[in-house]
Image (cartoon, rainbow, N blue to C red):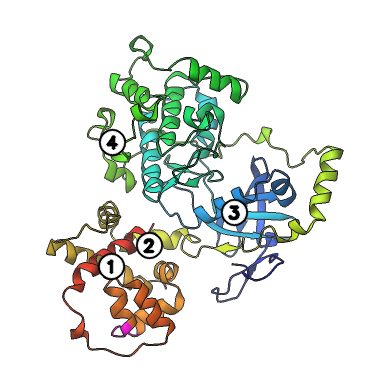
Amino acid sequence: MGPKNSKTPNTSLNISQNPKDETITRFSFDFIQLIGKGGFGKVWKVYSQKYKSYFAMKEMSKAKIIDKKSEKSIKNERDILSTMHHPFIININFSFQDKDTLFIGMDYLNGGDLRYHINKYKKFTEKQTKFFIGCIILSLEYLHKNNIIHRDIKPENLVLDSKGYVKLTDFGIAKKYVKNNSKDTSGTPGYMAPEVLCSQNHTFTVDYFAIGIIGYEFMNGIRPYLGNNRKEIKEKIMAKQAQVKKSQIPKNWSLESADFINRCLQRKPSFRLGLGGTSEVKEHSWFKYFPWKDLYLKKIEPSFIPSSKENFDYKYFSPIDKIGIKTQERYLNIINSDKYKNAFCDFEYFNRFCICQNDFEKMVKIANPHEIYEIENKNIDNKNNSICNNNNISHDMNLKNKILNLDNHNNMNKTFIKIMGDERYSSLRKKPNSQYTRLFLNGNKKSANKSFLSGNSSIVNSSNISNSGTQSNSRRSNEIVKDFY
């Protein structure tokens, strides 16, 4: 990360933890192919010789971002992605900048987005749609548990990997949920819930409204509400409640699928599926007996497998931007302003946890993913909940020990470095009986940090650790595993 007190941002990312102390710049990558364009710049397929991996690199113009007053949006996306890790969310690997451009490197997936495929095939089968929506629900479950509303669920932001699993991307307008959010009205009109279009306070159900739109589109090959602009779409939503009528259900589609779509499409949030949380959505009759656990572990064979070739419409992408004279003058004034120099301090980021997919796969193989799934889905957010079953405590601690020992296999200490930082991690391992370790394992992280900062690492008798701490150990183990993805 860049220096907090510096007024001028770093023009590259220095990885101090890297043994070679390498500095990342745009010249650290081979730019292979332009694979997308957005409001602020382009998305490139790039290759890193060092990591022997492909990445999807966002290249964004600082002048464009400032001109559209979107600095907060870009920083927000970087901040959210750097804290989110899940099998169905595209991970950020690094971010850095030069004088005129911001760069964000993410996982590269060659399966193409669902917009590309719906344009190509016009419709999907019920089985394919159900699988796609199942993947989206798991990603939303994780986001909503972390108090984040995505607010831009649409086919363009749903990308397939080579096996056919869907990953959610583009967190540019995602927000932490707050009660008074009526001013947050950004989004794609065709997939926006009516309460957002009408500038009203909204909750997590806006994401499920978008799922209803997607389900309708995949079933019928067209969105329920069409219009040339936001105003026209809003008028059509307010005029009539869209629904899939029994006579409109395509052959080989079930009544349950139509009911699921109709309940997601409810204009009133109080009637919409998902008001009671993700569990309400997963318990709908359409998903009866659906193997959620197997989907999370990617043990289900996807019903739609993209072509082995890259699935991008290259003909729509041009590396040359056509900018008018007035726009050029406006950008030039921005470049010469003081705001331009100070707008993106501390933008640099490097995720050692996600940078190497091979190491990640080894990590998941060692720490049994079945156990991770079970613990991640416990209600650990409720601090009043306690784990009283001794078998559960033993099970959780065994898993914690497995993850603790990961660094003995191919130097896989990235998990705990990410969670606690290098020095605290070393203190926990090298001084297992220190006061810091005792406080940390008893769940008193605040006191543990004070102990560490004060340099109090005196050895204590392990027998002094009371049995009452066992329950906190298990809870802390759950928190660790929650951060694992």
Nearest-to-viewer mark from 2 and 1? 1
Tell me the CA gap for discs 1 and 4: 31 Å
Q: Earlier in the sequence, mark 4 or mark 2?
A: 4
Disc 1 marks a residue whose amino acid type is Lys
Q: Residues within 10 Å of mark 2 (few under 14, many from 20)?
A: some
Image-based side of 37 in relation to 390, left or right: right
Q: Percent position (x, y) of residue 364?
A: 35, 59
Residue 202 shows in the view: yes
The residue carrying mark 2 is 362
Disc 2 marks a residue whose amino acid type is Lys
Q: Residues within 10 Å of mark 4 (few under 14, many from 20)?
A: few
What are the residue bounds of the magenta stretch? 431-435
Q: Residues within 10 Å of mark 1 (few under 14, many from 20)?
A: many
Q: Percent position (x, y) of residue 187?
A: 55, 35
- Tell me the residue at 35%/37% (across/down): 134
Disc 4 marks a residue whose amino acid type is Glu
The residue carrying mark 4 is 280
